[in-house]
Amino acid sequence: MKFHSALLLLSTRALITNAELVTFKVLAVNGIPTLNINNEHHKMEAVPDNYPLYKISVNVDNFPVNYNYILNDGEKDKEEKEEFTRQRTKDEYALNEFFGRSVTIKEHPLLPKAYESFKYATQSKLFNDNYVATIVIKCDPEKLKSIHTDVKSKEKIDAEVIYANPYTIKTFKNAKLSLSGQSTVEVPKLSYKIKKLKDDKNKELFGRSSIKLRAEHMDPSMLREKIYTDVLNTLGVPTPQNTFARLFINGEPIGLFDLSDDVKNSRYLRETFNQGEKYKDNTLNPLFKGSRISSEGLYSNLGYYGEDVNQPVYSWVYDYKGEDKVLNKTQHIEKELIPFLKEIDDYKTHKSDNMPLEIDTFLRSLAMEFLGGGVDNYWANPGNFFVYKDAEKNQWFFQDCDFHYTFGVKWAEKQMLMTPLSKFPPSILEDDKDDKTRPPLDAILEHQEHKDKLNKIFERILKTSYHQNALFPRLESLTNLIREDAHWDVTLTRTNVNPTHGLQNVYTIDDFENEATSEKPDGFSGGYTLRYFIKTKATLLAEELNLTIPVDYESNLGYYENLSFNEDEDSDRSGSLKTISINIFTVLICYLVSILF
C-alpha cells in the first residue's frame, strides 16, 4: 500500500514537472506552417476566422524551449525553413509571431519630452511601435490591376482587410482600397489608403476608420518619417501618428510601409483635438490643406491677398477637407479661410491683438521643420500642411504632415543642412518664385516675446528629444526592429505598371544599412545619411545661437511613450491555463488512485 502510494506520488510529481502544454502561434500568409522542436515536427492548424493565424499546443519538457517554423513541410520546391532559432521561457504567453521574422516584440528607448503632451489628444494602440504589424488585403484582381494601371483614377475598390499584430487579429470585410498621394502615384512603389475600417460589430481599428500606407519610396532607411513624428510627439503638438506595417495583397508580398493617420478622417480629428469625444451638435469644423504649384509661383503661405476668392493664390493652392457637403470649396474658402487669413494680417499690422492661430504649437512645428530639414513642408516650401479650426474652442491649429523628405534625403539637402536660421528659408529651386514671406510666422516674430520664445524652443529641443544621446539609441532600436522587413522590401517587384518618376530610387540592403546606421555624410544618390544630418544640424544651430549642448540630455518632464498593449491583453494565455488544468487534473486523479490502493 505504502509502496503504491509512494510510486504514484513520484509519478504525479514527474507529471507535474514535465507535462507542460505550451501554445505556439504564427502568422503565415501563404502555405501551412509546421512547428519544429528538436527536429520533432508538429503540423499547425489554421485558427477559424483568424486567417492568417496558425496554432498548436504541444508538451514541452524543458525550458527555455528552442524552436522555429517550417512552411510547407516536406513539399518539394515549396518548403521554406526559418534560418534562426526562437526561444520561449516558461512564463511567456503565446504571441502571434510572423513566419520568417525573428523579432516579434522590441521595446525601444523612449525620447524625453521637451514639452507636455498636446492636451486635447488621446492615444491609439494602433501606433504601438514595438512591433511591425501585418496587413493582408483581399480584393478583385482585375480591379486591383485597374488602379495599378490608371494611377490617377482615384478609384476606390472593395476590399477585405485583415490587420494582425502580436496580440490580436481584426478583420474588416467592407473596406475600401485606393491609391494615396499626388506625385507619389507616379513612382514604382505605390502608397495606399484604406477607408471604412469597421467590422461586423461596427468597431473601428483602434479608433481609426481610415489609414494610409505610405511607401517611403524616397527614403532608403524607411525611418525618417517615423523618427520625425517621434520628435514631434515630444513637442506637444498635434500630429498624425505612424508606425510600421508589412503589406500583402491577394497573397502577394507588397512591402514594408509606414502606417499613418489620415488627417482628413473625422475620427482622427476628434481623437487629436477633442480627447476622442464627439463635437456638440455635430459641429462641422473647417479643415483646409495647403499645397503649391511651384511652376506658377503659387504657394499656400497663409497670406491674405484681399477678398476675391477666385484668385489663384486661394483657389489653386487651398482645398477644403472638412466634413460639410452643403457648401462647395469656393464657399468654404470665402466663408472660413479668408477671414482667418485676414485676422493673421491684422495681427501682423497691429490692427488686432488677436492671433487666431495657436502660437506655441505652430512655432514648435516650424522649429522641427528647421531641425529636421523639412524641404517639403511649410517653412521651406509652403505646402503639405493643414489648418483646422475647433469651433467650440474658437481656435485654429496648424498641423504638419508628410515627413519623408527630411533629414538630408536627396532634395536640396545642402541648403536644408547649411542654411543658418537667420537666412532661412533658402531657395531650393533654380527658378524659385517663392517670395519667402510666411505671414503667420512673420506676424508672430514681429513680437519680441515670441521671437525669444522661438529661440527658447530651439534650445529646449536640442537639450531633450533632438539630443544625439536620446535620438541615436532609439534609431538603432527601430532599425533592429525593421531590418528583416527592410531587407525583404528591396527584393520585391513594385506595383506601379507604368512609373514615370522615382525610377532612380532602387535600393539595396547596403543602402538601407548605410542610411540607417552610418554617421558618415554620404547618403543615397548624394544626400546625407540620417544620423549625419541630425548631429550636424544640431551642432550648427547650437553654434549660431551660442548654445552649449549638455553631455546628457534633459528629461525633467519624463518621456513620451506610445499607448501599448498589456502583456496578456488580446494575447493567448491558453497554453499556461491548459498546463495548470492538466496538472491539477493529474494530481486529483493520482490522489484518488492512491487512496483506493
Image (cartoon, rainbow, N blue to C red):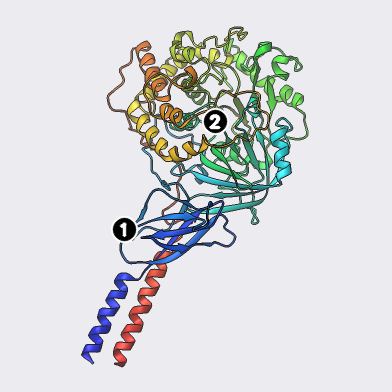
Q: Which amino acid, by three-letter code, is at mark 1?
A: Pro
Residue sitting nearer the eye, 562 or 516: 516
Q: Position of residue 69 (x, y in %)?
A: 44, 55
| Residue that mark 2 sits on | 216
Q: Secondary structure at mark 2?
A: loop
| Residue that mark 1 sits on | 64
Side of 233 relative to 438 (left or right): left
Residue 302, quarter of the rendered image: top right
Q: Earlier in the sequence, mark 1 or mark 2?
A: 1
Label 2 Cα crowd, 10 Å radius (few <14 / some 14-19 / many 20+) = many
How many discs mark residues in the rendered view?
2
Q: Is residue 62 above or below residue 454?
A: below
Observer able to see residue 112: no
Q: Residue furthest front?
A: 76
Residue 240, quarter of the rendered image: top right
Residue sitting nearer the eye, 554 or 147: 147
Q: Position of residue 160 (x, y in %)?
A: 66, 50
Q: Is residue 291 above or below residue 516?
A: above
Q: Position of residue 277 (x, y in %)?
A: 58, 44
Name the quadrant of the C terminus. bottom left
- State the separation of the CA atoms marked 1 and 2: 39 Å
Q: Position of residue 181 (x, y in %)?
A: 64, 30
Q: Is residue 248 above or below residue 75?
A: above
Label 1 Cα crowd, 10 Å radius (few <14 / some 14-19 / many 20+) = some
